[in-house]
Image: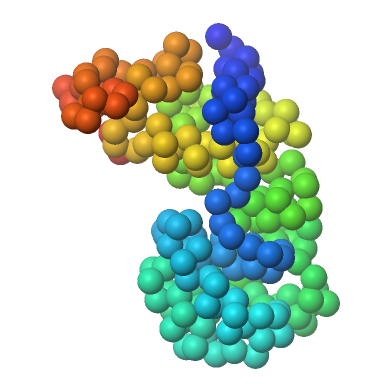
Amino acid sequence: MKKKELALLAIEKLKERYPEGICSLTYTDPLQLLIATRLSAQCTDARVNMVTPALFARFPTLEAFAEASAEEVGEYIRSCGLYKTKARDIVALAIMLRDEYDGMIPDTVEELIKLPGVGRKTANLVAGDIYGRPAVVADTHCIRIAGRLGLVDSKDPYKVEMALKKLLPPEESNSFCHRLVLFGRDVCSARSPRCGACPLQDACPSRVSLAPSPDGGGSAPSPAKKKRSGTAE
């Protein structure tokens, strides 16, 4: 099967499994999504969603963040990891948005990555979810699953993003990436992929030999085959 055919198959199978291909982060406006995504670096979305209600209640506007101290912001996000760096970035990007962008969140990846602490993953998420631009969010789930499916041959986020842009229909790319996150948590996990429960098992070149899972629910890869199959990370 050619890569483009496999990509289209993956889109349809994951759409069937996860009809709502939406972001796992909780937010009510573009600024909140931008900040929540910055917090999600090396942190789970579940943890970010636990932290942001109090954070956004204390700093409800761009101006509030711009006038805050990094130390105070840091107190609200301690459990997210790397909180001092993230707090400095959040205050700095709020100041930059206020002073250089008239308080508006940029609508392109090229402008978004100029903001402190904002990389291509965050920029693509914001550009895609807020402004509806075709975007590929090359996070850990996307990189892992695209590699296992043989859609990409690199773990470099930029190379993965560029490769998938050539394979995915623009109108499907945003929701497909969100579905990969759900799929990565649910089935195609980093260390113990449940290949027997995978809707793509017949087309996946990385499918491993199966052994019954301890709980009897689905299947897990045989330990002896993990290294050879490339599923261990």
Residue at position x 67%, y 36% in the image? 173
Give the percent coordinates (x, y) of residue 10.
57, 23
What is the basis of the colouring in this image? rainbow
Residue at position x 60%, y 76% in the image? 56
- Residue 66 visible (yes or no): no
Image quarter where the N terminus lies is top right
Q: Is residue 129 above or below residue 77?
A: above
Residue at the right extreme, as displayed: 102
Image quarter where the C terminus lies is top left
- Residue 35 visible (yes or no): yes
Give the percent coordinates (x, y) of residue 216.
24, 25
Quadrant in the rendering for residue 77: bottom left
Residue at position x 16%, y 22% in the image? 224
Residue at position x 44%, y 83% in the image? 75
Please state if 228 lies on the left or on the right of 113 as rendered.
left
Give the percent coordinates (x, y) of residue 196.
35, 19
Please state if 203 lies on the left or on the right of 162 as rendered.
left
Residue at the left extreme, as displayed: 224
Please state if 122 lies on the left or on the right of 189 as rendered.
right
Q: Nearer the viewer, residue 221 or 214?
A: 214
Q: Is residue 72 above or below residue 193?
A: below
Q: Nearer the viewer, residue 191 or 123?
A: 191
Quadrant in the rendering for residue 135: top right
Q: Is residue 71 above or below residue 23?
A: below
Give the percent coordinates (x, y) of residue 180.
52, 36
Quadrant in the rendering for residue 167: top right
